[in-house]
Amino acid sequence: MTTPSTDPATPRPPRRGRAVRYLRNTAIVLALLAGIFVVGPRNDFGPDAPAPRAAPPTAIGELDGWIAQQEAAVTDIRPGTAKGVVWHGAAGERTPWSVVYLHGFSASRLETAPLAEQVAQALGANLFHSRLTGHGRAAPEAMGEARVQDWLADTTEAAAIGQLLGDKVLVISVSTGATLATWLALRPEGRPVAAHVFISPNFGPRDKRSEIINGPWGQQIALALQGEMRGWAPQDPREANAWTSRYPTKALFPMMALVEHVRDSDMAAFQTPLLLLYSEQDQTVDPQMTREVFARIPAATKKSVVVDYSESTGQHVLAGDIRAPKATAPMADTIVQWVRALP
């Protein structure tokens, strides 16, 4: 009779088989989970076209009334943030130049004021201030109602109004307003624009965690990490009025979809003269991404200026009475001199 071996080195096939099966099954589960993650829902840009809406009037004398009627439909606009025209002379008279101002995400026309006003005054230009959908309103939930296509419509509307106001159109845009202006410059609707000024353009956030939103399950992850609402505490009553400091986390979704879509676009059609003003110390957007996108723009006339004279905390909103009053006049002068030197 053979005595069973008790040598610990003797193989035990049954146990080894169970371990192999466990590892194989674990690998299959992990692969399935990875597959589910990769093919999960992503942040969708949607149609590359503005949302349908009524066009501005073609008669300049009807413009003030039309804008007032449009804004009256929104009952909770904060003081000083509504769309509107600042006429250089008599209302209803065209000027050689017009200036269009596109503000940034969660901001309003007040963010850099009176920068655009000073530029328009120096150029003898009518000025149009836009208001992006969901912005400048008392109800914080309003920011979460906007789609990318609403902002595209705001942008093309602003360009059309600029053409009505002046012979040549200068678009001054800040942060995400500059992202929208870049989209405009690549479109037929943007060809009548004579010049662009980008201030701290948003081609990617400084905090790369925001890019998670555009990845698989990005919206769900953002909501899990941030909750339904996000915000910051204004340090000045003027900040509280000029910016929407508390808004739904989902308001970030169209903004990040826009940023990714625009920066990944073919820039070949961007032929409009461009002046870029930005800070290397910007804490909101990534200056390296700003430089990279600027380098891809083939416009024959373009200039990049590093702003090193702004006292703005965070170095993003580089001018204006609220954040950087001392920088407003020199920045306005830089813009005006550049515009006057255009061929």
Image: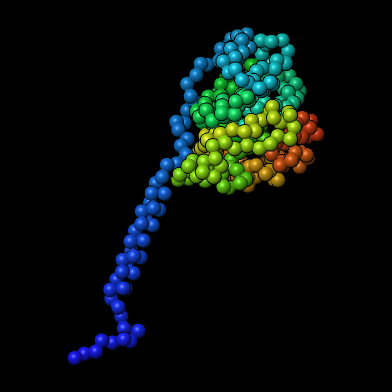
Q: How is the image coloured?
A: rainbow
* Count of marks, rendered view: 0
Image-quadrant location for residue 305: top right
Image-quadrant location for residue 141: top right
Residue lying farthest to the bottom in this orientation:
1
The answer to whether residue 76 is left or right of residue 31 is right
The answer to whether residue 20 is left or right of residue 61 is left
- Residue at 59% across, 22% down: 158
Across and down, in percent, residue 282 comes to 68, 43
- Residue at 50% across, 29% down: 147
Image-quadrant location for residue 337: top right
Front residue (pair 246, 125)? 246
Residue lying farthest to the left in this orientation:
1
- Residue at 74% across, 29% down: 237
Across and down, in percent, residue 238 comes to 73, 28
Front residue (pair 155, 209)? 209
Would residue 97 be visible to someone looking at this image? no
The answer to whether residue 9 is left or right of residue 335 is left
Across and down, in percent, residue 179 comes to 58, 35
Q: Could you tell me which quadrant the C terminus lies in?
A: top right
